[in-house]
Image (cartoon, rainbow, N blue to C red):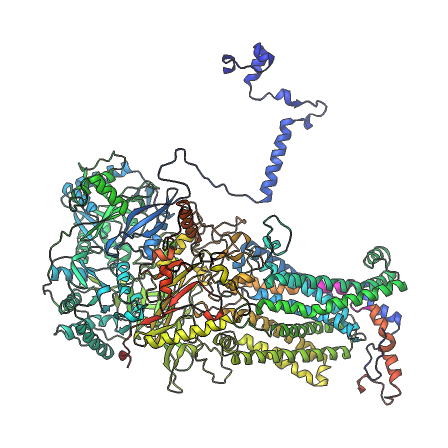
Amino acid sequence: MSAIISPIREPLITGNKTYHQITEDLVSPTEEMPPLGWVIGFILSVMGLGVFVFTVLWTIYQGIGTWNLNRTVGWGWDITNFVWWVGIGHAGTLISAILLIFRQKWRTGVNRAAEAMTIFAVICAGQFPLIHMGRIWLGFFIFPYVNTRGPLWPNFNSPLLWDVFAISTYFTVSLLFWYTGLVPDFATVRDRATGFRKKIYNFLSFGWTGSAKHWQRWESLSLILAGLATPLVLSVHTIVSFDFATSVIPGWHTTIFPPYFVAGAIFSGFAMVLTLMLVTRKLLHLEDYITIEHIESMNKVILLTGTIVGVAYLTELFIAWYSGYVYEQFAFFNRALGPYWWAYFGMMFCNVVSPQLFWKKSWRRNIWLTFFLSIIINIGMWFERFVIIATTLARDYLPSSWSYYSPTWVEIGIFIGSLGLFFTCYLIFSRVAPVVAIAEIKAILKYGGNQYVEKAGQGHDSHSHSEDAH
Amino acid sequence: MKKATNNIWVGEKDLTRDEQFIQDSQKELSLEETMVSDSANESLRSNRRDFLRFLGFGLGAATIAAGCDTPVKRAIPYVVKPDSIIPGVATYYASSYVNGGDYASILVKTREGRPIKIEGNDLAPDGLGKTSARVQASVLSLYDVNRLRTPMAKSGDGFVATNWSELDKNVGEALKTASNVRILSQTIISPTSMKAIGEFAIKYPSTKVVTLDPVSYSGLLDANETNFGKRAIPSYHFDKADVIVSFNADFLGTWVNPTQFAGDYVKNRNVSDLSKAKMSRHFQVESHMSLTGSNADNRILVKPSEQGVAIAYLYSQIVGGGSSAGLNDKAKAGLSKVATQLKAASGKSIVVSASNNVSEQLMVNAINNALGNYGSTMDMSNALYTRQGNEREFNKLVEDMNAGQVDFLIINDINPAYFSSMSDKFAQGLTKVKTKVAFGMAMDETNNQADYVAVTPHFLESWGDAMPSDTVVSVIQPTISPLFESRQMEASLLHWAESANYDPKAEQPYFDYLKYSWKDGAFANQNSFASFSSFWNDALHNGIVSVANQSAGNAYADGGSLTEITKPSSTDMEISFFETVNMGNGQFAGNPWLMEMPSPVDRTSWGNYLAVPVSFNGVSKMVGYNDLTDGDIVTLTIEGVEYTLPVVQQFGQMPGTVGLALGYGRTMAGGTGTNIGVNINNVVKNNGGYANYYNDNVTVSNALSKEKEFSCVQYHHTYGVTAEDTATGKVINADEAATVFFDYFTGVTGFQGALTDRSVVYTTNFKDIKEEVKDLTKKRETAQFLNSKQIYRGHDELYKNGHHWGMYVDLNACIGCGACTVACMAENNVPVVGKKEVSRHHEMTWLRIDRYYYGDVTNPNVVYQPMMCQHCDNAPCENVCPVNATNHSSEGLNQMTYNRCIGTRYCANNCPFKVRRFNWFDYTTADIFLANQVNIADEEIPFGADNLTRMVLNPDVTVRTRGVIEKCSFCVQRIQEGKLTAKTEGRQLKDGEIKTACQTSCPTEAITFGDLNNESSVLNKKIESPLTFIALEEVNVRSSVNYTLKVNNRDESFDA
């Protein structure tokens, strides 16, 4: 890590941390009994997971008829949730891969948790393409496996098949990347542990000794994986957007979808990272590692991507009008003013209007506002997917087939349940692995720690030492 | 042991007849030899057989535990194969459908001895061989689980099964002492039945026959009797009429013989050849939008109570005289113009009325006579006899019953306890009749009050004949052995009459009697055949024979009182009661196919919904009467009787009136029909003993709540209906304005052109046809030009080889009757899903008929568009399926591979026509999860899932399981059958040889199927019409189904 932190930058680590203190701060959560807040959260999450398991089994046993989909609206909350979860995953990859390549040092404070979030979000996302199948027990048909039926291959023209490849690739690379980062940290945990814990962490860290050769290989691997993951940030949601863009349904059949989906994914992903990190930072007392500076950086990304998304929405409307094509025009007219106007309104308000508050610096740095808006944005992005999927299908070409869709308790249960699945995984993660990458934090201490930054900055900025001066 | 006696021996001991060996061999199992003795541990003793036993138990237990218990399916092969049955090859028998006044000459398709499908009989003259939805669905009632298995006898409050000898004994005894025997029957058009009844009447001379129809035609029949001396209905030739005026007569849907009329009707409305374009003009005078009204060019709105004065007004205009006070001014103005046009088309017009008022019908006859229609468009000398009900006689019967003057009543397959407006009095009277014997297939409201139910076979199990008109006689022949212990009504009567011509010990006694009857009857009236047996064989083969007209000349003669017409009412609200295509007056309530079939006009199923008028509020909303919206539950009060029922907004419903379908609210109609909807027969107005299907003492409450299961299959009903925008005063497309749900306080009032600019259907007025065709051609050229610019080459070249199946649907011929939708269900094993599932838009129909209103919002025209898979050559569903479960055949068919489908529904989403159907639940119980069977309408098992009903399944079509998509296959099994026939006969396929189920069922021949690659095919000829278009052509899915520009002949001067 050769970058030099400019003296005018804010410090990335505050509290005059030493290497030992860093280890102490970040490893201790894995060694102590969980606090009450965690226990309550975990109980709630596991209950949510239970709801998930029940509603999914109910769906499989009874049939998709337990959902309120109909002959006109074939996808509803299921695929909405799928796209939403995949989108959320994107922030992790962006932070770990793209910011690594761009040498954004502030990423070290949040990348571990963000990557974990990616893994769990993709796990959640992956459930939906499976359970939305009418015959999940034949789900293996979608894999191009060698068979005696001809052989009979899947349809390589189908975006759903591309989804299978995109999501599985994405999951694999993200998992490897995440785990690679965890190896030296598990070794750190191991070194402090005794007994059985030591054995487990020893196994998890693959016998990491911290030799120079290990570090060298670890660095190379991280970079290679970052290189692999970078195109995935763009490709995965592009392919997800193909599910819609390659169709003939007005409102789906749109070339703007790939960039629009990617921007939206990063947008929602950062919102979710913020939601998680603000809570984690508080509960695990990580304020020195995840500083206001980090939060502000992420809010800037949100402001940017939110605005891109807003431009995309307006472009869609313009193109619909400009196309002179009645179906396209009506599709967007109907989105905004039709029976689902509230979803469109919610989407516009949450995704386009609300992030504009972040133009103001003090609001960007306001934790409560950030937390509130991060949730609003996630709701807004959910609305976006719902608008795209349900609204479009409900009123397409033939007026005779127009319909309306609202979910059943089963569909709602599956969505809430998927949140349970996600938070169960995340909460377990926060107790068994360091939520901030110890090795990476240590690597930037010398130019990101406040004591060093302030020292370096004295010559230029001698009148102030406080955080708020800049 | 026998062993000793033959020369076979096993081993030395056997040969030497060793004593011990013989003793041992007596025992079946010789345990000692297999025992492995372990004296040390007695409890662990086991032997080889124990091992096998444990192994078997273990395997069995494991199998049960695994839970994949495949139900045993019994299939019994023929021991001796009947000559006429080749497994896998269908056999067709000609027969006749007669039920509740409906008649059709039919062909019955049987497979392996099971009737599975009904087709029209092409050999039938006068268009009598066409099918309706009712005819198509009748095969399902053969396998109705609610049919009685044995004759029943009353015991206390209930019934017990009895047998025929017991029943014959009891009935015979009762008849001996009976002094007043009455037979109450539905219309009997069978000469042989009449003969049998005649023999019965000779034996029991007090016998009188009273006939009643579910929906009464007494007024018409009595008027005709007065004018012609013949109590019958004339033949109508709608093909010869240039002007058709119908006073509330639903002659395309339910009135008299609708399939015959519809076939004729469309002949004079075919404009596909512009150079010869000519079109009849059809006026419908009514308050509720009937199926016929929906096809009319102009509708003149009159309240139900104004029907009489409306007829009187036309009478005064054409014949002169008569009072028409109380008719609304708009109708007066309209009818004046109608009169002018009628006079101009003298001898080439038809005036019909569904009125059940004799004076009104006399006036209609007088009008027709004045116009010279008798003998040209109407023919009383070749009359129809399918409706013969006589309400005066029925009223007399009810009186006699109540007076205790009837002691023996035979009820023949009729249910007046349900459908009669005097049902209460009838039920009272029944209690005073000593012995009541009912003939019927199942329990119903009337049979339930009888002493004996003599169970009759379904018509597909029966012998019989029918004489629907003066010139044809047709045969009813069984196509399956009776499934239950049933006996035909005629056989029973002959048996009880101890007829000399009837031998109850014969193998098929009534069959013999039928032949005996035909020898004297039809055989004597023909001269093509010399021997009876060849005549009979020919009749059986063709199903129908033409006979010489035996009836007299029947000239028109004035008579009767013309003054007793319906008095116009001044109340604020009136209700009309109407018959729907699917439900009749309750006779079809037990049939799941008909129950699930949406009513063509309001598109609702599973119940009757109060039709309320709808109007445009001038801004952005369609407002129903009293602000009622679809599915609101209201209290309807008619003469103090309260009904709670849901409403449906009905375009074209006259303000100040509401409408409600007859035939629902049956209390004993099996699992399907019981307690579905409400029964309003008891508030049908009774004027002078005639049922008048309306009431003027009506109030409709505000919305009380919302119907949870509002089973309507179409939510958006209009295609650019016009109304005035109050803000600008301009005429706008009201429904397009009404697509706005929230305007963000901007005052946006919809998107003009949002519907009318779509290329789904095109409509025009006959006088504008040339311009519209020019327009359409231009639009099509633009679309085709754009499509030619696509960067993908497509596969058009490939599809030019071999066959390329396509279809042509003539929207000018389609009247929306829905026969095709039921035919499709029957042919393709489409499951019935029930009320709740329909309300959730889970209906499974492969073929639906979209109905759009267009034109003036208060008095619109209607276009029906049969919509099925368009078999696109550039199908959007195919490329999105991840597993290739739907793909394209080399013959241009879009095919579904059910086994491969994993149910992502992506194809359904991507279908622009929304014709793909998903098996949301296990509708057919073909699922692997046994416990997983949805409970529809509280049946123990879903419709069609029991072993009896399953007999109706078409063995050529896979029954689909839960979780897969299905859709129209262009009847691929029929294509395959046709190709195989041609192949085995070593010849090319002939054009028209393969017909789809919808095509054969269509009474107006609106659907043509064929090979697009065959240049001389009828299909290609029809496509050449300049009126042809392809729905959504510019989407470039390259569909194989062609439609026509819908043309109406509306006289727009009426709208001024």
Q: Nearer the viewer, residue B847 or B494?
A: B847
Q: Which residues are magenta?
A: A422-437
Look at 79% across and 69% down and name the residue there: A436
> x, y (%) of residue B532?
20, 40
Left or right: B98, with B863 as reference point: left
Left or right position of B505 against A26? left
Direction from residue A288 to residue B686 in the image, left or right? left
A195 lies above or below B774: above
Position of residue B765 relative to residue A137, above or below, is: below
Q: Is residue B110 above or below residue B1009?
A: above
Q: Position of residue B519 (x, y in %)?
A: 18, 41
Membership of A288 in magenta stretch: no
Asked if residue B405 can be seen in this view, the reply is yes
In the depicted view, which residue is nearer to us: B1000 or B575?
Answer: B1000
Q: Residue at x 25, y 69 (%)?
A: B280
Q: Position of residue A231 (x, y in %)?
A: 71, 69
Residue A430 painted magenta: yes
Q: Is residue B892 left or right of residue B421?
A: right
User: Quadrant of residue B295 in the image?
Assistant: bottom left
